[in-house]
Image (spheres, rainbow, N blue to C red):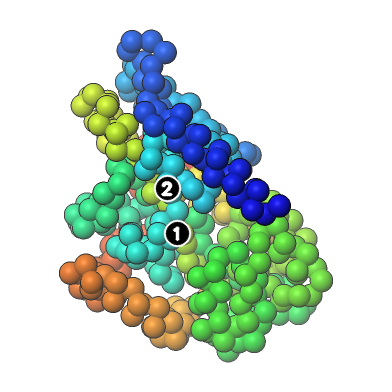
Amino acid sequence: MKSSKTIMTIFVFTFLLALFTFPISSSAADVIEIKANAFHPMGHRLYPDAFDVYSNQIEKRTNGKVKFKWFPAHTLIPQAKTYDGLKSGICDWAYIINAWNPNEFVLTNTINLPFAAVNSAHAARILWRMSQEYPELKAEYKKMVPLFWYSTAPVHIHTNKKKHMPKTLEDLRGLRIGTPGPIFVKYMNALGMAGQQVAPGDLYTALQRGMIDGVMFPEAPLRSQKLTDLVDYHLMMSFGVDVFTAGMNLRSWKKLPPDIQQVFLDTAESGGALCGATITNESGWVMEELKKRGDVIYYLPDSEKAKMKEVLAPFFDDWMEKIGERGMDGKEILKRVDVIAKEAWDNPYQPDSWWGRAGRKE
């Protein structure tokens, strides 16, 4: 059964590849249709508050010459195959998860290291600055055209305050914490926790049955996964994020007239900031509601973060070894990115007028 499902998946993917090898199409001589792949589930705020607004803005700036056709909830390409689908031309535009290609996007994945970014908006700002300062970052994208960057919301630790209210590294040791991300399991185990990889849909049951003591998870999905029924203590760590890169298929990009390419480039920084703001604000609103109902929200002090980074030094060493293999000085990059991160936090991107209500609470 498993084998037949695998064969069917390969068949469907191959069929789509053949069908969309040259994806950009025109229903009229002067209209360019962009097939855009998105894998977030329907109902996610990114669709109405970021993706639609971004594509509408490009359509407006091109006087209707460009039209986006969205394929949401990985209806065009399976989530795990997004990068392959973009490279091969099944879609024209997509966003990829860089962590799934750790040896290809080493410089980009600097922001995936522990405590690199406070939130998605912060990550978008840092990555844009890095893309301007480091030509090596854009050089990592030989198989696609990168347009902008943002990230998931950061993960924190959430528990039941009647049972566990960790505030220090010592308090965390021995706790059984579930999380979907395999890299976070490795980090937690290194810190002395009993990290367990648990699919998002299984976290509720694992927590309810006492199989885990808490979860390492972003804020906003706590509500959609109904984990707010079981947790009411939140150790806000901004422990880590996963970077997204939004970009275009190489052939699709080369088919665009120069003036259309320029529109995409002109909206790139703002598009990344918009996606980051949408995710960050949604997370903040969820925490506001939880605070109003009486949840305890505790922010991990910098002194404790420093202790954790010291324990996690081997992971930073591994990254520096990879970056060194590419002829770059990892220590200097980390120092510079730390400066960029501080400047980005002190000078956040200001919402553009074309964002409308996107990225805002109202």
Note whether 137 is above or below 65 in the view shown: below
Q: Quadrant of residue 225?
A: bottom right
Q: Residues at badges 2 and 1 in contact (C-beta under 8 Å)?
A: yes
Q: Please state if 330 lies on the left or on the right of 118 as rendered.
A: left
Q: Nearer the viewer, residue 27 or 238?
A: 27
Q: Nearer the viewer, residue 292 or 66?
A: 66
- Image coordinates of residue 205 in percent, x first then y, are 78, 64
Q: Please state if 330 lies on the left or on the right of 237 as rendered.
A: left
User: Which residue occupies 23% across, 72% down?
Assistant: 325
Amino acid type of the residue that numbered disc 1 sits on in the rendered structure: Trp
Note whether 10 is above or below 130 in the view shown: above
Q: Secondary structure at mark 2?
A: helix
Q: Secondary structure at mark 1?
A: helix
Circle 1 Cα neighbour tier, 10 Å, few/some/many (<14 / 14–19 / ≥20)? few
Instruction: Spot the residue most to the right.
Output: 209
- Image coordinates of residue 280 in percent, x first then y, are 50, 52
Instruction: Spot the residue most to the bottom.
Output: 170
Note whether 318 is above or below 171 in the view shown: above
Residue identified by numbered label 1: 100
Mark sitting earlier along the chain (2/1): 2
Q: Please state if 74 lies on the left or on the right of 231 as rendered.
A: left
Residue identified by numbered label 2: 83
Q: Which mark is residue 333?
A: none
Q: Disc 2 and disc 1: Cα gap in Å?
A: 9 Å
